[in-house]
Amino acid sequence: MSAPLADRMRPRSLDEVVGQDQVLGAGKPLRRALEDGKAHSMVLWGPPGSGKTTLARLIAQLGVQGKPCHFIALSAVLGGVKEVRAAVEEAQQLRAGSGQRTVLFVDEVHRFNKSQQDAFLPHVEDGTLTFVGATTENPSFELNSALLSRARVYVLKALDATALRQVIDRALADAERGLGASRLTMADAERDALAQAADGDARRALNLLEIAAELAGTAGTIDAGTLGQVIAGGGRRFDKRGELFHDQISALHKSVRGSDPDAALYWMVRMIDGGCDPLYLARRVVRMASEDVGNADPRALALALDAWDVVERLGAGEGELALAQAVVYLSVAPKSNAVYAALNAVKAEVASQGTLEVPAHLRNAPTKLMKELGHGRGYRYAHDEPDAYAAGERYFPDGMPVTRYYHPVERGLEAKIAAKLAELRARDAAATKEGGR
């Protein structure tokens, strides 16, 4: 058999598709539509090996009103507007001649720019094409609204170990398309190990199985040693730019914020294992230190910066230990987002106001003219006041009420900061009352 095992074992019916019950289970809208011959334009969003291409082919096979559709496959990586126009022309000729409808499958559709995506919209609109796009990226960010308004989005999931075992078992048993004629033996432990190594990707599972079968040769057994050679060094799914990347950094950040050092370490290692640049992680850890720990433990920011420095000096391999140290410290440190909340509140206030003048007493007066204009007049030098605090002094623009943006939490060092601010504000109130008499 010349075709790869993954291609030979491609499901030929909806019942052969495994692991996508959320869209293809009994009674689900997509399954009902396909079985009723009411194929419609759609975007299939899911990780590699989840069955996007297979489902597109089945959509064409089931067709419209019991009549199979012509299937045209394009890759957005290799094609462009020229290829789309050629596909449209082919579809128009078929429809005018035999009346056959066409399913246009665009793999990696997120790689098309806006004008390329717009090229086939009129032909989707008038029914010349049933569009099926496949993407590993979030359609909300990568596809334009005009295309999304004409196509329904279906989310496909990575296959779990149970589903991958079905794929592996079927390939080993199928004598027509799979490896059944070879009478290979493979113990359950090795099948489970292969399912885990495939990491949610059916195509990867079958490719690894095919290589293992070739290595087994005349021995007829795929044992632990043979399988180990095949799956050694396999990486987990990770996209340095895409949805999975953003999901994992979100999980890391929220684990730190949630004070779970074990989960935080897990997500950090997952990202490094997938090829994430440790310097990116170091920058994000610094952000976490300011956003979620803040003044509850100012040492967290220093430790995060130290970890960044270590990663730069020692490189990824040796530097990751310092990064792990920082992640664990931030996870167990007392938490405060008071500075983060204060900064956002001030930004909103500044954006909503005009350009308020700096009060005269707060301005510098380095020249005679400035002194004559009253710059600096009445300013109270804090170091000359009791406890180096000018009680009752105003630092906001004239006419703007004194506003409290920073509200320290009762955790860590900020509990002491809160107490200190409360004391100073009490002195301000007393000084204001006394001055008003």
Image: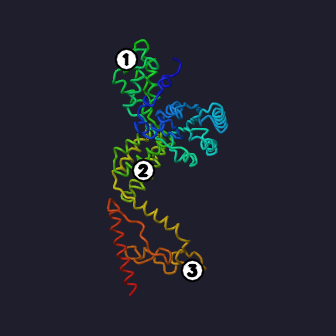
* Outermost residue, top side: 218
Image vertical order of residue 358 relative to residue 295, above or below? below
Q: Earlier in the sequence, mark 2 or mark 3?
A: 2
Tell me the CA gap for discs 2 and 3: 45 Å
- Residue 304 is marked as 2
Q: Position of residue 104 (x, y in %)?
A: 58, 35
Element on which disc 3 rests: helix
- How far apart marks 3 and 1 lie (CA) works out to 95 Å
- Provide residue 12's location: percent of width, then percent of height: 48, 27
Q: Quadrant of the C terminus?
A: bottom left
Q: Name the residue tied to disc 1.
A: 185
Within the image, what quadrant is residue 295 found in?
bottom left
Q: Residue 214 in the image: x percent, y percent?
A: 46, 17
Mark 1 to mark 2 CA distance (whole Å): 52 Å
Q: Which amino acid does label 2 sit on?
A: Ala
Please name which of the two marks, 3 or 1, marks the residue nearer to the observer. Answer: 1
Q: Which of 145 and 161 lies nearest the eye of the viewer?
A: 145
Amino acid marked by disc 3: Lys
Crowd around label 2: few <14 · some 14–19 · many ≥20 (10 Å): many
Residue neighbourhood size for the residue with mark 1, other residues' Cα within 10 Å, grouped as few (<14), some (14–19), many (≥20): some
**Disc number for residue 81:** none
Describe the element under mark 1 as helix, strand or loop: loop
| Residue type marked 1 | Thr
Instruction: Please tell me which residue is depicted at 45% across the width and 25% down the height of the picture.
Output: 206
In this picture the colour scheme is rainbow
- Viewer-nearest of discs 1 and 2: 1
Image disc number at residue 371: 3
69 or 189: nearer the viewer = 69
Q: Which SS class for mark 2?
A: helix
Front-lying residue, 164 or 204? 164
